[in-house]
Image: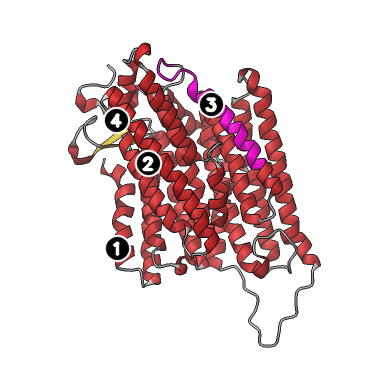
Amino acid sequence: MHWIIAPVILPALLAPILAFVMRHDIVLARSFSIAGTVALAAIATGLTITAAGGETLVYELGNWPAPFGIVLVLDRLSAAMVLLTAVLGLVVVLYAAGSGWDRRGHHFHALFQFQLMGIFGAFLTGDTFNLFVFFEVLLIASYGLMIHGGGKARLRAGLQYVIMNLAGSTLFLFALGTIYATTGTLNIADLSLRLQEIPADDAALARVAAALLLVVFAVKAALFPVQFWLSGTYANAPGPVAALFAVMTKVGAYAILRFYTVIFAPGNEVTGTLPGDVLTVMALVTVALGALGVLGTRRLMPLIAFSVLTSVGTLMLAVAGFTPEATVAALYYIVHSTLATALLFLVADLVVAQRGPAQDRLEQAPPIAQNGLLAALFFAGAIAMAGMPPLSGFLGKLLVLDALGDSDGRTVVIWATILIGSLVTIVGFARAGSVVFWKSTALDRPEPEEDAPPAPRAPGTALSGIGAMLVLLVATTALAGPMTAYFEGAAEQLYDPSDYVRAVLARAGEGGE
């Protein structure tokens, strides 16, 4: 099944060609980058259809069997995340080409493909060390994209982002060293078996590794107390880059789901109740901090960034439930929040580009071109992010609240935090929309000078990308039933990893028989 490695190999081959051969020909670079991303979306669709049958498929690099060789593993969860990333990447690259953002540096498309390679690899790898490797690919490519176009504020935010993630990478190496010293393996399936054999009295080092990994993945997911890099990074990144970063925090959420169900299952002798209890507290504080940021900010891009923080906290509350029902809600919410975040950042990018000196400050300015259209798109993204009907945000939060409805004495606190956070998000977006779109119409548009060029209008290709994102949000709402059915199968595979272990270790004579 060589198609499993295609999402990693294709961008890895395309990126150097874009960097060294086509960097001075933007038309050629755009054509190849878009064509490659279309191919990735088609491959991801095929992989998702294949994984829907419930079989766990394994690709052994160099034909070396696990646990000694490197393996890529395709199941329902990894296939769904690859498809989400591919679709998001296609919309973002179309927007970047249509808006002209890719002209502001020679290497945008090369870095973009490297970024996709890192994300795909992180979702498909069956080895903990190679997850670290793909995290580093992500870090390098995302930093280059983050500072694309230059600017002091962007460089400052990018430096903070890199420092935080390098610290996380260092902890990741410590955790991997501890795991290897304890078990003698780094393969995810093999670790699942080895940790079950460790006596409770000898599990201290394994508990240390589990705690270190939780910190690492909390950094990637932007959870309290290591969440502060997100607001500055997302608010200062170029619009299409911020939209692509919408899936970045989901890598951390994915890693937590994968590691703390397959390797460190809740309630076992090694981890005890560590993941769920700690994650719940971290997620609750993250929701609160995001809501306070939404209320306090006076700029549009940070407003969206803080609402993303609230969304991250809501998602991680579902992840922390560590039940099949809560995981189904988390997976649906991952898809919704990724699309809603990307839509808002793309709309905000067009608004900021047309507001001139006012940029993203929440203050009155003369009305922009296509004010009504952009206001409608912003409204759609806002109600999706806030969790209002009829879009998928309402269904996503309803699933989360329902799944966490019997969380012992924490139910009231969880429900109150999510609902108050949603209310604050609604207030913040209502305030921003009224200032940017409604109150601006009360100002007189300055009379254009003779022979002055017409007011800039949003490029059609860029608007098409935003329209496609809105269609995807509507489709997520309409197809909620089939999607949750698919995610129920993914949750079943996570909480009963015997098939995963058997498939990966089949040639090693193991597999939990």
Inspect this view and state whether residue 140 appears.
Answer: yes
First reached walking from the N terminus: tag 3 or tag 1: 1
* Front residue of 14 and 51: 14
Q: Give the quadrant of the N terminus.
A: top left
Q: Give the quadrant of residue 55.
A: top left
Identify residue for label 3: 278
Distance between the Cα atoms at labels 1 and 4? Answer: 32 Å
- Residue at the spot x=37%, y=12% of the render? 201
Identify residue for label 4: 187
* Front residue of 484 and 512: 512
Residue 4 location (% of width, % of height):
31, 42
Magenta: predominant secondary structure element? helix
Identify residue for label 1: 17
Distance between the Cα atoms at labels 3 and 2? Answer: 24 Å
First reached walking from the N terminus: tag 1 or tag 4: 1
Residue 108 location (% of width, % of height):
42, 62
* Front residue of 390 and 244: 244
Q: Which numbered disc, 3 or 1, marks the residue closer to the eye?
A: 3
Q: Secondary structure at mark 1?
A: helix
Mark 4–mark 3 CB contact (< 8 Å): no
Q: Give the quadrant of the C terminus.
A: top left
Give the residue type at disc 2.
Answer: Ala
Q: Secondary structure at mark 3?
A: helix
* Magenta-drawn stretch contains 281: yes
